[in-house]
Image (cartoon, grey):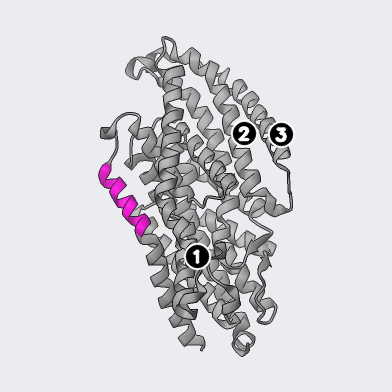
Amino acid sequence: MTLIAEYGTVLLILACLFGFFMAWGVGANDVANAMGTSVGSRALTIKQAILIAMVFEFLGAYLAGGSVTQTIRSGIIDADMIPPDKMVFGMLAALLAAGTWLLIASIKGWPVSTTHSIIGAVIGFGAVGVSFDAVHWSGVVPIVSSWVISPVLSGLVAFMIFMSVHKLILNTEDPFANAKRYVPYYMFAVGFIVTIVTLTKGLKHVGLHLSGWQSLGLAALFGAVVCAVGVLLLSRIKADPVADKSFHFASVEKVFAVLMIFTACAMAFAHGSNDVANAVGPLAAIVGVLNSGGEIADKSVVPGWVLLLGGVGIVVGLATYGYRVIATIGQHITELTPSRGFAAELATATTVVGASAIGLPISTTHTLVGAVLGVGMARGIGALNLRVIGTIFSSWVVTLPAGAILAIVYFFILSGIFG
C-alpha cells in the first residue's frame, strides 16, 4: 500500500508508456490480420492499406474497444491471491514483456498472437511472482489446443469458399459476366459476417446490448447496403481484353479487388475493437488499483484516455513496422490474387464469428494464416512456401513461454527497483 502511495505518479507514467508500447506491438504485428491479404493480392498498395487501417483500426479501438474489461486477462489468474503492489508490478511486467516479444516478432516478420503474448506474460508473473496455484492452469489447455483448431477450421472454410468461386466464376465460359452476377452475393456475405463480428466482439462494450435476432437483422441490413454499394461500383468496371490476354482472369480480379476494399475496412474496425483490449486491459487494471489507493476490482472501467492511448499506439505501430508482417501474410506463404485474398478474409471472419458463438478461444492471427494456407492448398501443396510456414508455426509455439519468461524477468527487475 505504501509503495502505491509513494510511487503512484511514477507507476502511472510507466503504465502509460508500457501500455503504449504494447499497443504499438499490436499495430506492428496483429494488424496484418486485416491488411496482409489485401496488400498481398495487390487489391491495395501498402500505403493505401496503412491509411485504411489507421482510420478503421483507430475507430474500432476508440469507439468499440471496451468500456468495461476484465482486470485479469481472460481470467487466467486468481486476483484474490495477489496483493495490490504485486498486481501493479505484475501488470507492468506483462505489458512490457508482451510488447518486447511483439517487437522481436515484428522485426522478424513473424505473425504471432498478441492475445497469447499477453496471456503468456500474465501466466509468467502469476506463477513465479505470486504462486503456482494463482494460475488457472485448466484455462491454458484451450489456448494450446487453439494452435491446431483455429488454422484447421479456417483453412477448411477458405478452401470451400475458394472452390465455390472457382466453380461459379473462374471455371466457366464467361468468368467476367459471372463475376458481376455472383460477387454481389459474396458482398452481402462480407457485410453480414463482419457486422456480426463487430456486434458480438466489439459494440457490446459500448453498452449496446442486442438480442440475437436484433444482431441478425442489423447484419442482414448492413449486408444489403454493402451489396447495393458494391453493385453500383461493379457497374463501372469494364472488361479489359488486352489485360485478359496476358492473364485470363485480369478483369475478374478487378471485380474482386473492389470486394477486398470492403473486407479490409470492416476487418480493421472489428480487429481494432477486439484487440485493443490486449493493451488496455492490463493498463486499466493498473489505473484502477492506483486510483482506488490499492484496491483490486474484478472489473475496471476503461477511461476514455486509455482507449485513446491504445488506439494511437496501434496506429503508430502499423505505420512504423506493420509492413514486415503484412509482407509475410500477403506474399511469403502463397501467391495471392484478390479472389484468393477475399476467400481467406471471409473464412477468417466466419471462423471468428462461429468460435465466438460457441465460446472457443481462438487467435485471429492463427485463423488468418490457416485461411491463407487453405486457399494455397486449393492449388496444391506446391503453391505453399513450407519453410515460411514452418517458421510461423514455431513462432506460435514459442510465444506463450517467451511472454512468460520475459514477464518473470521484468517483474523481478521492477520489484527490485521499487521494493
Find numbered disc 2 in the image and state the secondary structure of the residue it sits on.
helix
When the figure is inspected, residue 13 is found, relative to residue 169, above or below; the finding is: below
Find numbered disc 1 in the image and state the secondary structure of the residue it sits on.
helix
Kindly report the distance in space between the C-alpha atoms of the residues bearing marks 3 and 1: 39 Å
Find numbered disc 3 in the image and state the secondary structure of the residue it sits on.
helix
Q: Is residue 55 left or right of residue 376?
A: right
Quarter occupied by the N terminus: bottom right
> Percent position (x, y) of residue 308?
63, 59
Q: Amino acid at mark 1?
A: Phe
Judge whether residue 94 is colored magenta: no
Q: Amino acid at mark 3?
A: Gly
Q: What residue does disc 1 label?
A: 21
When the figure is inspected, residue 3 is found, relative to residue 73, above or below; the finding is: below
Read off the magenta span.
386-397
The answer to which of marks 1 and 2 sits earlier in the sequence is 1
Q: Amino acid at mark 2?
A: Phe
Q: Which mark is residue 217?
A: 3
